[in-house]
Amino acid sequence: MFNLFKKKKEENKRGDQYLSLKVREVVKETSDTVTIYFEQPEPYLEYKPGQYLTVILELGGKEVRRSYSLCTSPYIDPHPGITVKKVKDGLVSNYLNDQVRPGKTIEIMKPLGNFTSDFHSKNKNHFIMVAGGSGITPIMGITKSVLVNEPDSKVTLIYCSRSQEQIIFKKQLEGLESKYQGRLKVVDVLSRPSGDWGGYKGRLKPETVKSILSEISYPEIEGSKYFVCGPDGVMDTALEAFASMGVDQKNIHKESFYLDLDAKEAELKSKGKLSPELTREIEVVVEGQSYSFEVPAGKTILEAGLDNDINMPYSCQSGLCTACRGKLISGKVDMIEDAGLSESEISAGYILCCSSKPAGSDIKIVIE
């Protein structure tokens, strides 16, 4: 039988890692946050829970890119979705909240990111999640995936919000907690709650994290996994608590939405850890095509590549997202920020072009 409604395969002139998606639905989560669900392309968009999409827009005559985590699970949600919280003076976040409607087509880079987990029906894990604000977005996708894929695993979510009205996914989380009683426990911590709030109040403290977790005991659990995502304050607090509890670093997964690359570079310079800035000739291979160009003193490899109209992939430009990841085949670079890379990736020679500057000659980088 012929499929009369079969969708045409999406194509994109930029390359295989790019795609155009049509907006299916826009859901208002809070006064300043929306979830944008997309129609599934053909073939289906493959992603792992916790990964992110890079949205590419033309605003004010200029191309802008921003990364937003997927809040959906590929195991249970029919349509992929991203959740976007407004940022003060945020060009893209405000546009996506106020201007996007169903039917609009948005160009994206395909999903990337290491803030995820593998799942198996025989696992007996305790997933301990700490989220702040929109940091709930990737954790939501991971939580739903755990609950549906690992029937013997448990999830404890400590979620920090400003007030009751600012709890993103409030109804969804209540529904999941009811559906998976005994397997999902959500603990809200509100910094500015209304007078009738009876839960945890104020800023999250290490003592609060430890107190919450000390009251939860699952004797049958074989291992624990820790996921932290949100503002620096929430993340630092959670990590401090985990350290005092003796949690092994290899079991902690972190996802940050912001890093100050300039401040990090200034710190490294003050400590004499960066090479002298000189103009260098380098070679970059992008999807099999080789390009040779100069990187002027002070510029990153990505900046110089884009200045030369080379279609190098990128998104956050702050060393977090890994969209610009490449493998250093020869030569030496100074990588100012490597937060988006795992230890194994760094050992294998991978670098982030957005935060790397030439530190020698004969540099060759392959971006696949």
Image (tube, grey):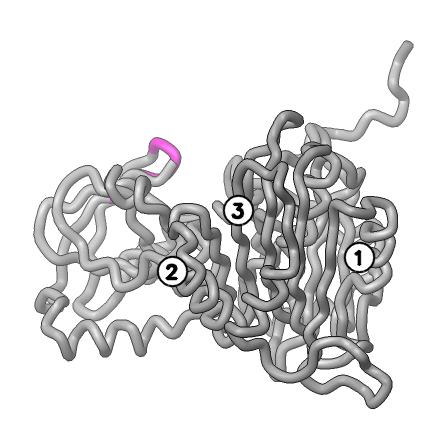
> Can residue 172 be seen here?
yes
Above or below: residue 240 compared with residue 225: below
Alpha carbons under labels 3 and 2: distance apart: 24 Å
Please, what is the three-letter code of the amino acid marked with disc 3?
A: Lys
> Can residue 47 be seen here?
no
- Residue range of the region highlighted in magenta in the rendering: 284-288
State the SS at label 1.
Answer: helix
Alpha carbons under labels 2 and 1: distance apart: 31 Å
Above or below: residue 117 compared with residue 321: above
Find disc 1 in the rendering and name its residue: 173
Please, what is the three-letter code of the amino acid marked with disc 1?
A: Leu
Q: Circle 2: is it few (<14), some (14-19), or many (20+) Cα within 10 Å?
A: many
Mark found first going from the N terminus, 3 or 2: 3
The outermost residue toward the top is 1
Q: Circle 3: is it few (<14), some (14-19), or many (20+) Cα within 10 Å?
A: some
Residue 39 appears at what percent x and percent y? 79, 43
State the SS at label 2.
Answer: loop
**130 sits left or right of 161 in the view:** left
Label 3 or label 2, whichever lies nearer to me, is 3
Residue beneath the point at 63% across and 34% down: 46
Find disc 2 in the rendering and name its residue: 319
Above or below: residue 97 compared with residue 361: below
For residue 265, what is the image quadrant?
Answer: bottom left
State the SS at label 3.
Answer: strand
Label 2 or label 1, whichever lies nearer to me, is 1
Q: Depth check: 303 or 54 in front?
A: 54
Find disc 3 in the rendering and name its residue: 225
